[in-house]
Amino acid sequence: MNLYLTPELQANRRGRFLTSLLAISPSSEQTFPKEGFVLMTGEQLQASPEQQAESITWGRQPGCTLLLLPPYKEGSIFPFLDWVIEFKSSPLANADQTSLETILAGELSHQLLGSDGDCITNSSLDNLACHTRYWKAHSNSGLIAVTTLPLWSISLLDHADKVLAFLAELDKYTGKPSATIARDEPQTEPLHPEDITVLVCCYGFGLATADGLSDRLLGYAVPLLNLASFDLPESLHRLRCEGLIDDMGLTETGLAFLRASRYWPFAENLKGEA
């Protein structure tokens, strides 16, 4: 399990504590690694639609695990998942500090609501029992998770083993690049730049077929796309394999991806004109 911190987390005291506690090698990477387990604060991701889109794309790849840590802003975390953060008074510290959850029980300041994905629970936390949720696009995809446990707490100074065991528990659900992909699951290929343009058109026209898009685009006096240079069937295939479109048009993941991109205003304008 190769652990990474985002540059923003790596630069503050929480990140420095995690680096020391978990023996994480400092990284100079400014973007997500090719694969690995990345730790990021929730408020960092919530403040940046661009990072949300990048995280969604990265977290779908086999071998990639993203875990968001406190602090968070109150409200939604990802636009395509029903996860919501609320501020909450912490329960009293548990005298029986035998687990990671009971050690941190007195420091929990956030409550995680929602039902998408799967939940890691601890009954000793009462109404804060569901402290961590994780979501996967399909059985061999990467994993996106959020936790209300402050893993950067100094209370864990002598409990690195418990933190590593918790991270390893999450990581075991992440699809691995070497795993055999079921025959009914599509092989994924990185998106090409023109695929985003096609995704905008799919949203704007409410279509998801090459023939349908071609007919609509040819009806414009000034074409939106140079159809001679676009391979619409291949673009649609890649978008479908990424789970961004299906037979009905954009999926929830595709809509969230588009909303978090810089192309969203153009997509909304195109839909209004259509």
Image (tube, rainbow, N blue to C red):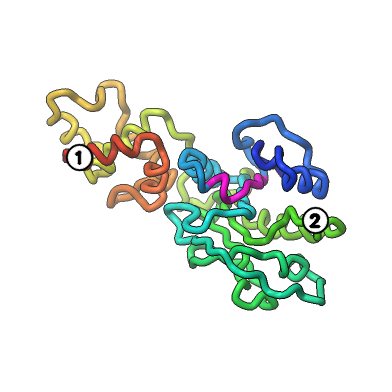
In the image, is residue 206 above or below residue 138?
A: above
> Which mark, by number, is residue 212?
1
- Position in image of residue 202 (x %, y %): 28, 41
- Position in image of residue 157 (x %, y %): 84, 56
* Badge 1: residue crowd in 10 Å (few <14, some 14–19, many ≥20): few
* Residue carrying label 2: 154
Please say whether residue 1 is visible from this viewpoint.
Answer: no
**x 80%, y 56%: residue:** 154
Closest to the observer: 6 or 186? 6
- Position in image of residue 210 (x %, y %): 25, 37
Instruction: Please identify the residue farthest to the right as the structure is shown.
Output: 158
The answer to whether residue 149 is magenta is no
> Which mark, by number, is residue 30?
none
Q: Is mark 1 on a helix, strand or loop?
A: helix
In the image, is residue 199 above or below residue 124?
A: above
Give left or right: position of 41 versus 106: left
* Badge 2: residue crowd in 10 Å (few <14, some 14–19, many ≥20): some
In front: label 1 or label 2? 2
Q: Which amino acid does label 2 sit on?
A: Ile
Please say whether residue 63 is visible from this viewpoint.
Answer: yes
Q: Residues under labels 1 and 2: Cα distance?
A: 58 Å
**x 63%, y 57%: residue:** 173
Q: Name which quarter of the figure residue 219 lies in.
A: top left
Residue numbers of the magenta segment: 37-45
The answer to whether residue 41 is magenta is yes
In the image, is residue 81 above or below residue 201?
A: below
**x 28%, y 52%: residue:** 248
- Position in image of residue 110 (x %, y %): 60, 63
Q: Which of marks 1 and 2 is nearer the N terminus?
A: 2
In the image, is residue 255 above or below residue 8?
A: below
